[in-house]
Image (spheres, grey):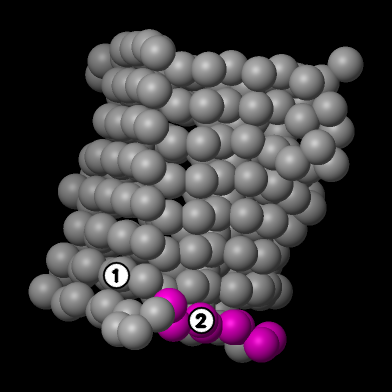
C-alpha cells in the first residue's frame, strides 16, 4: 500500500524527454495506490504511447491530479483484477495526434469509476475510452474548446456494463468525428453488456 500526496500545493512533474521503462512518467503495478495532487506533463516515448501514469496492475485512486500534454494522460493494462478511481482530476491536450492515444485510456480491467473530473482537447483521440468490464462515469465535464480536435467524447468499444450519469458532453465544431458517445463498436468482450445514460447534457457543435 502506497500513498503519495502533494502538500502545500500541487507537485508538477515534467517528463523532459525521459520516461520510466520507456512507458510513462510513473509505472504502477502490484498494490494499492492513492495519488493526490500530482501533475503529469508532456510524456512522449518512442512507441507514441507515453503516459503520465501507466497502470499495469493494481488498485489505483487518483485524487485532484492533472494530466496535460502527454500521449496518454493515464493508460492501463488489461489485468482483470485491476480497478481505477479517478476523482476530481483534469485531463487536457493529451494524445500523439494519430488517433490511437487518448486523454484517459482504460484497458480490459475489472472496474473504472470517474467522477467530478474534467476532460478536454484530446489530440485526435478520445476524451475518455474505457474497455473495462464495469465503467461508472458520473458528474464530469467532457468538453472540447471551440478549436478542439477530439474524436469521441466517451467510448466503450468492448461494451461491458456502463453507467453514464449527470455529465456534460460537448463536441467542438473542429471535431474529427461527430459521435459523442459510442458503445460496443468493436464487439462484445464481456459476458454481459448494459448501457445506462441518464440526466446528461449533450451538445454537438459539429456542422
Above or below — where is 20 with respect to 206?
A: below
Above or below — where is 143 with respect to 59?
A: above
Choose between 116 and 29: the one closer to the eye. Answer: 116
Residue 147 on image: x %, y %: 84, 41
Above or below — where is 203 with respect to 44?
A: above
Residue 154 on image: x %, y %: 54, 30
Structural distance between the alpha carbons of marks 1 and 2: 13 Å
The residue located at (82%, 21%) in the rendering is 206
Left or right, 93 with reference to 55: right
The image's mark for residue 97 is none
Choose between 126 and 27: the one closer to the eye. Answer: 126
The residue located at (68%, 86%) in the rendering is 17
The residue located at (62%, 55%) in the rendering is 92
Magenta range:
10-17
- Assign the N terminus to one quadrant of the image: bottom left
Residue 5 on image: x %, y %: 27, 78
Amino acid at each position: 500500500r502506497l500513498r503519495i500526496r502533494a502538500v502545500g500545493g500541487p507537485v508538477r512533474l515534467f517528463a523532459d524527454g525521459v520516461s520510466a521503462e520507456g512507458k510513462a512518467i510513473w509505472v504502477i503495478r502490484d498494490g494499492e495506490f492513492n495519488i493526490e495532487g500530482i501533475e503529469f506533463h508532456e510524456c512522449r516515448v518512442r512507441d507514441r504511447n507515453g503516459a503520465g501514469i501507466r497502470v499495469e496492475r493494481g488498485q489505483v485512486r487518483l485524487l485532484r491530479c492533472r494530466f496535460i500534454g502527454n500521449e496518454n494522460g493515464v493508460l492501463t493494462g488489461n489485468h482483470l483484477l485491476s480497478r481505477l478511481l479517478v476523482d476530481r482530476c483534469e485531463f487536457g491536450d493529451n494524445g500523439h495526434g494519430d488517433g490511437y492515444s487518448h486523454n484517459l485510456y482504460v484497458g480490459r480491467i475489472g472496474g473504472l469509476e470517474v467522477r467530478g473530473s474534467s476532460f478536454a482537447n484530446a489530440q485526435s483521440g478520445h476524451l475518455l475510452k474505457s474497455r473495462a468490464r464495469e465503467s461508472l462515469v458520473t458528474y464530469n465535464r467532457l468538453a472540447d474548446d471551440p478549436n478542439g480536435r477530439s474524436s469521441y467524447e466517451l467510448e466503450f468499444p468492448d461494451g461491458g456494463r456502463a453507467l453514464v450519469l449527470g455529465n456534460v458532453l460537448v463536441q467542438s465544431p473542429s471535431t474529427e468525428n461527430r459521435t459523442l458517445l459510442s458503445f460496443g463498436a468493436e464487439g462484445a468482450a464481456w459476458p454481459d453488456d448494459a448501457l445506462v445514460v441518464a440526466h446528461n447534457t449533450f451538445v454537438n457543435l459539429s456542422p
